[in-house]
Image: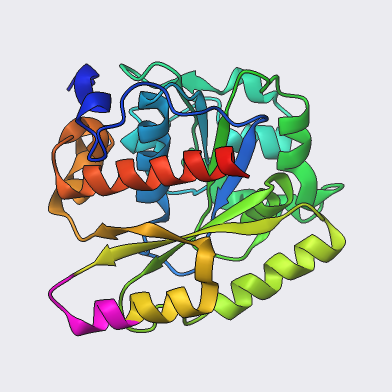
Amino acid sequence: MTQTAPLAGNSPSGQEGHWPRPPKTRVIAVANQKGGVGKTTTSVNLAAALSMHGQRVLVIDLDPQGNASTALATEHRGDVPDIYQVLVDDLPMSEIVREVPDMPGLYCAPATINLAGAEIELVSLVAREARLRRALASFDSVELDYIIIDCPPSLGLLTVNSLVAAEEVLIPIQCEYYALEGLSQLLHNIDLIKAHLNANLQVSTILLTMYDGRTRLASQVADEVRVHFRDTVLDTVIPRSVRVSEAPSYGQSVMTYDPGSSGATAYMDAAREIAYRAASV
């Protein structure tokens, strides 16, 4: 399906056109070691929403499942050059980055199944925690406004590489029972990386996902997260949405698959918050 050009004018707040560009490239790791909390969905849809409003965005797929690559219609099977070769074989990042079809300004660094072995292979390499940061340092990203890194559901070396390369962490938290379980370990790891490997790292954004307004539990979890993290939590919450789940099977984000859906509207609002928060700092 082709991108719907008028989408920018259909945004709920009525704001049209380009959002403010950040003063320098924002590198954001989307991380949570729990699976199924919406990391890939969030990475892909925020990136698509930002690109629709004049931002130049690169999504780095750091999950061996390659779901972000699938959702962005970027080939990631067979011998396609991918992020594995960048991390392990020192292939330049510029040789794997591809522009997403029908989405001007949106790019993807794909992951193939080869990435599944990277955790083991990285162990013996020099500066194993900083391989992605080094690759980005030699990549001409001056024209990019955002680099969004989709992390795997673990706290292994791939996620560590992401956190060492990024300056910001966005944590999706699902509005369900046990939502905060394991989060303390992620925050502890972030503190360790900040202390020893990346002093500039900060948790800049918490996004509440899978919100079901019909249940008391969802509102209780949302309230608890807001008490814990205060202004770090976006005002926008992402509702449960069938359309969001369907979109990747068509090689699309929900922003193009069904622009009028509740999920697309929510991700557009969340992306706007992220863009304007940076502009107001």
Residue 100, picture quadrant? top left
Magenta part of the chain: 213-220
Would residue 184 be counted in the magenta stretch?
A: no
Name the image quarter holding the N terminus: top left
Prevailing secondary structure class for the magenta stretch in the rendered image: helix
Viewer-proximal residue among 228 and 84: 228
The image shows residue 239, relative to residue 254, as above or below, that is below
Is residue 66 visible in the rendered structure shown here? no
Q: Is residue 215 magenta?
A: yes
Q: How is the image coloured?
A: rainbow
Q: Is residue 204 left or right of residue 105?
A: right
Q: Is residue 121 left or right of residue 185?
A: right
Count of labels shown? 0
Residue at (33% x, 62% y) in the render = 209
Q: Nearer the viewer, residue 235 or 41?
A: 235
Where's residue 32, x and y in %? 51, 64
Q: What residue is rendered at 34% in x and 36% in y?
A: 70
Q: Quadrant of the C terminus?
A: top right
